[in-house]
Image (cartoon, grey):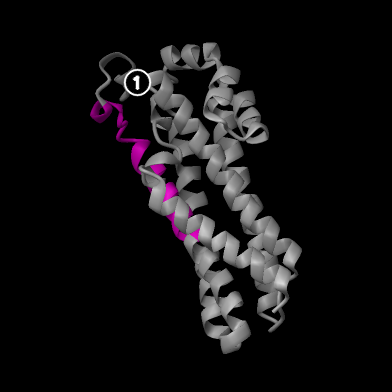
Amino acid sequence: MNKQIKRYCVTGIIVFVMYCIYNPIAYALVWGNWRECASAPGCTCTLTLDIKKSMSPSLKPYILESAGYFLKSHDAYLEFLYCVEMSESKGIESADLKNALYNAIDNMEKAKTAYSNLKTASEKIPYNQEMIDLLMKFDYEGFRVKNGLNEPIFEKLRTFLGRGDIAGFDDAVIANMDAILIKLYEIKGVVDKGLAPEIMIVWRIYQAYSESQLFGQYMSEVFRDILF
């Protein structure tokens, strides 16, 4: 295997494992958490600080479902990278390689469906104007600097939350998933022909997963700072 590809795969896997070990909050509880607090009724945590009351029954399940499938998709893609990595010493296990890739695609499609269902459901619920006002007044720059957040990703988030544009945020989440799926389909077309994908697209997919995760995580961080 090309040494450059090997370094990329090993580094990516190590970084992800270290993140899972040292991050004190599970991914599914970080990505998109408290999104339901932008909608009413069902979220009074801005007043009571009682997180149990923030769980709007019509929206919360979609958030958890989408986040869970996204994580499974990410895991499957890392398994795909692992199969590619191990091919140098064990040879390519085509079945394992394809299974990992297909699982990444299947779970990302489910994540997108769940979040699309959330968006559809939220369109039937009025926004929590108190929360929208707090989002529009939030000190985004100070928060970003204080927490050392990735500036381009956080600024993208700010363009939506700073205007109280929750619908725009939801559209961006779905667009991020679409971008990953397009690249995964591209790799599938190559792998199905028994060929190895170009390293550039392998890099871009890993980057797309990371950026999409941070986009949703930063939203959760902003909401948590406002609520608590």
Residue 71: x %, y % from top left: 45, 54
Query: Which residue shows up at 48% across the image and 62% down it?
Result: 75
Q: How many marks?
A: 1
Magenta residues, dominant SS class: helix
Residue 69: x %, y % from top left: 44, 55
In the picture, measured across the screen, residue 164 lies left or right of residue 204, that is left
Q: Nearer the viewer, residue 58 or 159?
A: 159
Q: Does residue 125 appear in this view?
A: no
**Against 5, is 40 above or below?**
above
To which quarter of the image does residue 49 belong?
top left
Residue 54 is covered by the magenta coloring: yes
Q: Does residue 119 appear in this view?
A: yes
**Against 86, is 213 above or below?**
above
In the picture, measured across the screen, residue 161 lies left or right of residue 224, that is right
Q: Which residues are magenta?
A: 51-74
Quadrant placement of the C terminus: top left
Look at label 1 and name its amino acid: Phe
Q: Nearer the viewer, residue 8 or 217?
A: 8
Query: Which residue shows up at 40% across the image and 26% down it?
Result: 224
Q: What is the crowding at mark 1: few (fewer than 14 residues within 10 Å), some, or many (at least 20)? A: few
Residue 46 is covered by the magenta coloring: no
Query: Which residue shows up at 66% across the image and 77% down it?
Result: 191
In the picture, measured across the screen, residue 64 lies left or right of residue 135, that is left
Query: Which residue shows up at 24% across the image and 30% down it?
Result: 52
Residue 6: x %, y % from top left: 65, 71
Quadrant placement of the N terminus: bottom right
Residue 89: x %, y % from top left: 59, 86
Look at mark 1 in the image and give the residue it sits on.
228
Query: Tag 1, which secondary structure?
Result: loop
**Against 176, is 130 above or below?**
above
**Against 111, is 62 above or below?**
above
